[in-house]
Image: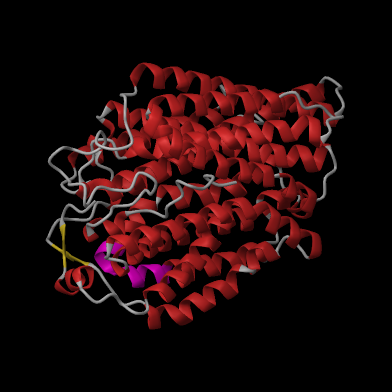
Amino acid sequence: MSTGTTPSSDEALDASADRPDPRRWKALALLGFVQFMFVIDMTVVSVALPRIQGELDMSRTGLAWVVNGYVLMAGGLLLFGGRLADLFGRRRIFVTGVVIFAIASVISGAAMNPEMLIYSRFLQGVGEALAAPAALGIVFLLFSAPADRVKAVGIWGGLSGLAGTLGPVVGGLIVADASWRWIFYVNVPVAVIALALVGRLVGETRMERTGQKFNFAGVLTATAGLVAIVYGLLQAAERSWLSTQVLLPLFGGLLLIGLMLLIESRAAAPLIPLRFFTNRTRAVGYLVGLTLSCAFFGFTFLTTLFEQQVLGYSPLKGGLSFIPVGLGIAFGVGLSTGMIPKFGVKPVIIVGLLGVTAGLLLLSGISVDTHYASGILPGMLVLGLFFGLAMPGTANTALYKVGTQDTGLASAMQNVMQQVGGALGLSVLVALALRLGGDRLAEGVNARVAATEGYVLSYRVSAVLLVVVAVIVLLLLDKIGLQGDWAEPAAQTPADAPSATADTPSGDPSTAGTSTDDRSSAPPGR
């Protein structure tokens, strides 16, 4: 992503100054607060979905769009947002993204029909895609000293992880004491505070353009293709797989993705360098991230519906029920960082994938009479623990044999794959669950039983996908240690090698604006 840009003199001065900016910690607090808002907005909506469905008379496929609209735009346009921040100024693009996000939040809260809510969620995702990579790029430049940068990025990742865990709880509290609309309205004061203070705490930085054209066409065709594919998959929940309503968007989306590949292969400065996928180990790592996110998004969406619509949980009780997942992830991440130096990345990822599979199989034993302690909690704990175990190793594969100048882009691609995997996976799993549930309902089966059978099918399909990917990892992933194997030999030195626990470039400011918000230590979204 740094191709075609060179640091301006002001930016180079900022990046190499001996005297750090005295405002940097205040700026980090402000930017981290906004990042917290972005991540929590992915997860906070989950427990409100049944209330939204009831008030707006929304179908279950419509509910999937409430999640997917945000995720598709936030993930599909992330690299685009980073490039805009590079060229037009990180603070300017950050402000633009926050303004868009705030406006979209107001529209979401005021939504009078399903379409209004879904389109505003798309707009929210656009706001995040602009502001999040710009914010992280600012953090990289503010904290030029290696020790400070490691600390700052650790705080950033910790806030993301905390937001991912607290989202359902916060959502449950808001919905319990107020309307679901306030899960969107609460974003507005955060945005106003950020807009009021960012000019005082953050200077403008940008990269000088060198005459190469910015490749807009690639990202637009890729995002449009993903939206079309997701639309086709969700249509399959209500129509035949061979119907024109399903096949046209699916094939149209695939054609757009193919067009994107053609555009990117011919672009002088591609937004998505296809060479990133030519390394087998890195490509397998992207597949692992995509599949884990697929399973995680489907699990959280369907489990929320099961708890509230089948078991009768309140939004608050449903939100609290997910706390063990967050605790399991945190413990698993810590366990993984101790296991990787001893056993390497490959076996830890395989164990993580198989462990998440076990968690899903435990959850597939649910029924309309399930009790939380015996029927849901064990699966949540196992799934969370092994999901956390798999994620650090997966993040390492994104940086395998990547030069210093590309570490930000490599990490960004991993985050994009996680977002896209979540959206695609949620679409497939929701379609399967709703299709089976609808068929069983038509056969005269009780509605709660029919819905539960659909959820069970989706859990099992997720488990099968994870086993397949575990076999692919076993056969195709190279042996990777914690250090020394995942950088080009001549590309970087120990002093500037990227951290194994943070998806960030460690020293090159030219990659800062193209990095994404670091979610490697957090769930990919709920």
Q: Nearer the viewer, residue 417 or 173?
A: 173
The percent coordinates of residue 99 (x first, y second) are 48, 71
| Residue 55, above or below 64 | below
Q: Nearer the viewer, residue 363 or 429?
A: 363
Which residue is at a point 67% across and 49% down the rendered structure image? 46
From the image, give the main secondary structure of the stretch colored magenta: helix
483 sits left or right of 129 in the view: left
| Residue 32, above or below 254 | below
Q: Which residues are magenta?
A: 85-96
The percent coordinates of residue 467 (x first, y second) are 52, 19
| Residue 147, above or below 190 | above
Number of marks: 0
The percent coordinates of residue 59 (x first, y second) are 71, 43
Query: Is residue 252 in view from this perspective?
Result: no
| Residue 439, above or below 252 | above
Q: Nearer the viewer, residue 179 or 460?
A: 460
Which residue is at a point 66% across and 45% down the rendered structure image? 63
Which residue is at a point 65% across and 45% down the rendered structure image? 62
Query: Is residue 410 in view from this perspective?
Result: yes
Q: How is the image coloured?
A: secondary structure
484 sits left or right of 99 in the view: left
Which residue is at a point 35% across and 72% down the rendered structure image? 91
Image quadrant of residue 456? top right
359 sits left or right of 95 in the view: right
Q: Does 263 lie within the magenta span? A: no
The percent coordinates of residue 493 (x first, y second) are 17, 47
Image quadrant of residue 231? top right
Image quadrant of residue 16? bottom left
